[in-house]
């Protein structure tokens, strides 16, 4: 009984610590929310108010209507989905091979994967723009962004998923091959299902990252009908027009759906991770 | 023909085609722009000959003029400080959180999920928020530090040359903690429980267990986290643009931001490209180190 | 069915299609890039122009301030530039000097709508390069000194400062750290905004971008340094733009701010105190005045396939200049347009001062390498203000750099 009671107290204490950490870590998110409810100049007030005197809820409706957010969100969704699909399809196979062998060629492959990602998007965009223009890809601007972005997100995915494949016992695949499976069969029926959780988590992370992509979309997508929400958000920012409250309101509406989906899904993700299903 | 198909399905061809597709894709969409940058660094580039490859060749002139500029070396030093501090901070906080959340208590899974929030937020927004938090007069961080008595005078995080780089580092640590934590959590989850239990029976202390089991078994994950951290940190651009714009007086300027400034503020594309080539060289060295570290990986 | 019949049918279909929509078939589409959103002039003018039955359609793209130059030169280099662009005035020469903009001197001379004489000298100078006109000013603005009248009253000050010394004095009197009030707000950011705010000071003292290290300019930078060292302005002045700096004024945390007329509408809405606008203080009583000239110009790209249609669009835009102030709160760059009172006392009084200040506004440049010149000036400002060098040393360095650019 005593030991049981102690356990309860430890876990309660841990919960309190965890909550404290979460409050600190999530503060920027809260600050975004509070700023969105202030008036334009309230934002600059000293000392800063933790809660606005008169919350300006109307900012949200105003931003939603004036900026046609539904369309922006649709485009963000399109780009994020496309990027996730390409990254996952191409990246999974590559990660599998990079995990399966241990030789010089694999080292070179890993080296290339990392190396190719050094430069920030802001420095990659000019050459990509010039090249895409030459092959006419700019006529399909969202596709162009998806391709460019997939190349950017893939190393992250490959390194992550490679670690997952490393954790799949080699013997299982060997056994499947001995049983008469082809390499493709063993990969598809044995290895892939075992690595499923890791691939899923990584793909979701890629989706989230692509959802916020900005630099490529801004330069490659010129028609406003096709632009994602990040570009819409940027249209509030200018030297003479920084309306922080609106920016934050827009950002809240932008981040909330994806955060919501994530909170719904995360139980599955985290459970998959911690149960040791990766092994 | 049949041999080819069967090789694709069931032999070396299977591996080669899987890896080749991804590699060709990467080389096309990431490699080619790098080469373009490298070529530009040896040319005289004008905003109006951007679209062509045939430009006046100037050899190493761009490199010479870059190193003749007194602001270059401090900027590279800033980059080193930024990268090391950011990676160290992200890793320590991320690892701490990952270890903490392996403890069992109600709601652990939910709360851990919330820490991924920074991953979801668009870079633009993160920059804008930290800009506010770190602001000298009306920033909430100063307000908080003052009210708990840590400081008596406001710290001008963004505008004091002694703090400006650290302002960006703080924001970047916040941003990168999420991915460090999640990757390290995956790594921790992959360590079999029974190894710990056996060690515990043998009387190993928590610190001993951490040093003799956790760290060695996490080596592959740590290698991945650190090398990805390096890439993300070197790519960090939004935070500089939003918080300090590299200022004041270049005190928080780093290579990647400077390269962008050169290209898109002064329209000196050649020197912008020159800086990016130097960055590529540095990352090349780091990649070699990473690849060597994977040599010690163990397969499950 | 013989081939002949097919041919006839096809011809018939074609001719009916043409007859059904005579204008559509001939409609020319031109593209316009500008930073204006749906509440600002260009967006609306473009829409109105498209709706007119003139056979010209405009495809409009909103583009951000920071991206105008990089986006448009990338587009120009790859042959995808728009027909018309709105470009920030100091960057006009960057394009005009390289032949990227169309010389429209003759078109303007022949136009019954656009008359060069009607424009203020400063804005007109910014669209000129080597004696030719490469565009039309879109609007104009300048900076002056806003001050909080309530705080003035409390401190017993009855008039806005006229000279630099008075400005520093007034700022000292108004500075009130206990109540979180700074004497002054402005922007010394390492961007075009910093140059925009500093150049008027140098020009008033006899300097300019081509002689930035004259004694008066050094004195001006010394005064900026005094203001920052004594914390009469927030240290964040170094990294904060004009809009954010003015925000602190509106919130009552700065007693004065140097900024432009684009702030008027926001200030009316958000400042909960009485305020006024004064001309920029000058070095000494009786010194020559000067100010910065801001805002955008219209230009046609030299590779436009429809230069005549594009010019027609510019003519339409220019013909709507009288709506700029009443509808959009922007100042036309023209001397022939009277600005009717708005009926809002604060705004009308402010407008008078800005119109007066505009008379002294000088274009930055024009020079095709302006961004580099501006960068040299920004570097000097930042180095001096952070104590990296004295004002004299910093400006000498800038002058040396600018000299190699001008050569």
Image (cartoon, rainbow, N blue to C red):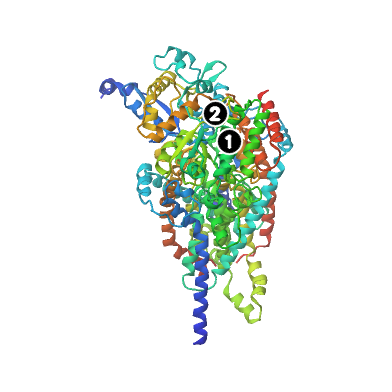
**Percent x, y of residue B157:** 60, 51
- Return the residue at label 1: C166
Viewer-nearest residue: C85 or B208? C85
**Percent x, y of residue C343:** 35, 32
- Does B282 sit left or right of A73 as displayed? right
Q: Which mark is residue C252?
A: none
Which quarter of the figure has residue C285?
Answer: top right
Q: Earlier in the sequence, mark 1 or mark 2?
A: 1
Position of the C terminus of chain B, as image quadrant, is: bottom right
Is circle 1 on the same chain as circle 2? Answer: yes
Residue C364 in view (yes/no): yes
Which residue does the image show at 38% across and 35% down from the upper left? Answer: C39
Q: Nearer the viewer, mark 1 or mark 2?
A: 1
Residue A96 in view (yes/no): no
- Return the residue at label 2: C291
For the image, the number of numbered tags is: 2
Above or below residue A69? Residue C135 is above
Viewer-nearest residue: C253 or A41? C253
**Percent x, y of residue C269:** 39, 42
State the SS at label 1. helix
**Label 1 Cα crowd, 10 Å radius (few <14 / some 14-19 / many 20+):** some
**Percent x, y of residue B36:** 62, 36
Q: Residue furthest bottom?
A: A1
Q: Residue furthest front?
A: C156
Above or below residue C264? Residue B162 is below
State the SS at label 2. strand
């Amino acid at each position: 009984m005593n030991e049981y009671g102690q356990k309860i107290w430890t876990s309660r204490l841990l919960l309190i610590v965890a909550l404290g950490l979460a409050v600190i870590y999530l503060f920027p998110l809260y600050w975004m929310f509070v700023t969105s409810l202030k008036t334009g100049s309230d934002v600059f007030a000293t000392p800063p108010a933790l809660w606005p005197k008169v919350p300006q809820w109307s900012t949200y409706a105003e931003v939603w209507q004036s900026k046609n957010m539904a369309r922006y969100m649709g485009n963000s969704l399109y780009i994020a989905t496309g990027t996730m699909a390409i990254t996952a399809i191409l990246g999974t196979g590559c990660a599998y091979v990079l995990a399966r062998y241990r030789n010089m060629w694999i080292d070179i492959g890993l080296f290339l994967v990392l190396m190719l990602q050094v430069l920030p998007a802001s420095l990659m965009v000019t050459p990509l723009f010039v090249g895409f223009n030459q092959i006419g890809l700019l006529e399909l601007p969202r596709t162009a962004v998806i391709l460019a972005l997939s190349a950017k997100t893939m190393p992250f995915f490959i390194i992550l998923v490679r670690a997952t494949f490393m954790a799949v016992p080699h013997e299982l695949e060997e056994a499947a091959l001995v049983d008469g499976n082809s390499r493709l069969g063993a990969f598809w029926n044995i290895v892939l299902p075992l690595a499923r959780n890791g691939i899923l988590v990584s793909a979701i992370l890629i989706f989230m990252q692509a959802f916020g992509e900005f630099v490529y979309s801004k330069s490659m997508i010129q028609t406003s009908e096709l632009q994602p929400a990040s570009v819409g958000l940027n249209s509030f920012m200018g030297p003479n027009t920084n309306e922080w409250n609106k920016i934050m309101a827009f950002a809240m509406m932008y981040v909330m759906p994806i955060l919501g989906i994530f909170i719904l899904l995360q139980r599955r993700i985290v459970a998959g991770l911690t149960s040791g299903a990766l092994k | 023909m049949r041999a080819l198909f069967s090789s694709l399905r069931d032999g070396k061809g299977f591996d080669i085609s899987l890896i080749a597709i991804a590699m060709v894709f990467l080389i096309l969409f990431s490699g080619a722009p790098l080469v373009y940058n490298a070529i530009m660094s040896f040319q005289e580039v004008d905003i109006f000959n951007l679209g062509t490859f045939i430009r006046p060749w100037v050899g190493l002139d761009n490199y010479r003029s870059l190193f003749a500029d007194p602001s270059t070396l401090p900027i590279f030093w800033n980059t080193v400080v930024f990268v090391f501090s950011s990676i160290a901070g992200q890793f320590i906080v991320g690892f701490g959180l990952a270890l903490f959340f392996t403890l069992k208590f109600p709601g652990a899974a939910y709360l851990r999920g919330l820490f991924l929030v920074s991953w979801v937020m668009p870079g633009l927004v993160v920059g804008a928020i930290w800009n506010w938090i770190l602001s000298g007069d009306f920033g909430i961080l100063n307000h908080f530090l003052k009210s708990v008595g840590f400081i008596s005078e406001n710290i001008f995080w963004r505008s004091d040359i002694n703090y400006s780089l650290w302002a960006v580092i703080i924001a970047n640590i916040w941003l990168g903690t999420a991915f460090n934590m999640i990757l390290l959590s995956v790594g921790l989850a992959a360590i079999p429980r029974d190894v710990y239990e056996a060690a515990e029976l043998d009387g190993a202390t928590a610190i001993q267990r951490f040093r003799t089991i956790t760290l060695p078994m996490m080596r592959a994950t740590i290698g991945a986290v650190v090398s990805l951290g390096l890439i993300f940190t070197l790519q960090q651009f939004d935070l500089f643009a939003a918080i300090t714009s590299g200022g004041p007086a270049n005190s928080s300027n780093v290579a990647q931001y400077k390269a962008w400034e050169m290209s898109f503020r002064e329209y000196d594309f050649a020197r912008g490209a020159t800086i990016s080539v130097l960055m590529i060289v540095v990352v090349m060295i780091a990649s070699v180190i990473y690849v060597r570290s994977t040599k010690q990986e163990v397969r499950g | 069915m013989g081939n002949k019949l097919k041919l006839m049918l096809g011809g018939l279909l074609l001719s009916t299609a043409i007859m059904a929509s005579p204008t559509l078939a001939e409609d020319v589409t031109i593209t316009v890039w500008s930073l204006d959103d749906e509440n600002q002039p260009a967006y609306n003018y473009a829409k109105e122009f498209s709706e007119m039955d003139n056979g010209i359609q405009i495809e409009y793209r909103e583009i951000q301030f920071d991206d105008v130059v990089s986006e448009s030169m990338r587009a120009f280099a790859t042959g995808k530039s728009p027909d018309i662009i709105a470009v920030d005035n100091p960057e006009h020469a960057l394009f005009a000097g390289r032949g990227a903009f169309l010389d429209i001197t003759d078109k303007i001379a022949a136009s019954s709508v656009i008359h060069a004489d009607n424009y203020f000298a400063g804005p007109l100078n910014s669209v000129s390069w080597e004696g030719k006109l490469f565009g039309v000013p879109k609007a104009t603005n300048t900076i002056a000194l806003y001050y909080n009248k309530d705080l003035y009253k409390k401190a017993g000050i009855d008039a806005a400062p006229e000279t630099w010394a008075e400005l520093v004095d007034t700022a000292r009197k108004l500075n009130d750290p206990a109540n979180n009030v700074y004497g002054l707000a402005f922007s010394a950011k390492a961007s075009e905004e910093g140059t925009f705010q500093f150049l008027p000071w140098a020009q008033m003292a006899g300097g300019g971008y081509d002689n930035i290290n004259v004694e008066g300019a050094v004195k001006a930078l010394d005064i900026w340094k005094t203001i920052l060292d004594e914390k009469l302005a927030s240290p964040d002045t170094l990294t904060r733009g004009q809009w954010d700096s003015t925000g602190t004024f509106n919130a009552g945390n700065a007693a004065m701010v140097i900024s432009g007329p684009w702030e008027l509408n926001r200030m009316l809405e958000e400042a909960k105190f009485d305020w006024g606008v004064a001309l920029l203080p000058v070095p000494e009583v009786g010194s020559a005045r000067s100010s910065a000239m801001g805002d955008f110009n219209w230009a046609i790209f030299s590779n436009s396939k429809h230069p005549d249609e594009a010019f027609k669009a510019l003519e339409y835009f220019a013909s709507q200049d009288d709506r700029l102030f009443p509808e959009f709160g922007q100042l036309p760059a023209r001397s022939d347009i009277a600005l009717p009172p708005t009926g809002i006392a604060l705004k009308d009084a402010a407008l008078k001062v800005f119109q007066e200040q505009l008379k002294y506004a000088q274009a930055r440049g024009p020079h095709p390498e302006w961004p580099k010149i501006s960068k040299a000036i920004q570097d000097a400002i930042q180095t001096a203000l952070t104590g990296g060098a004295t004002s004299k040393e910093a400006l000498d360095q800038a002058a040396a750099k600018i000299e190699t650019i001008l050569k």
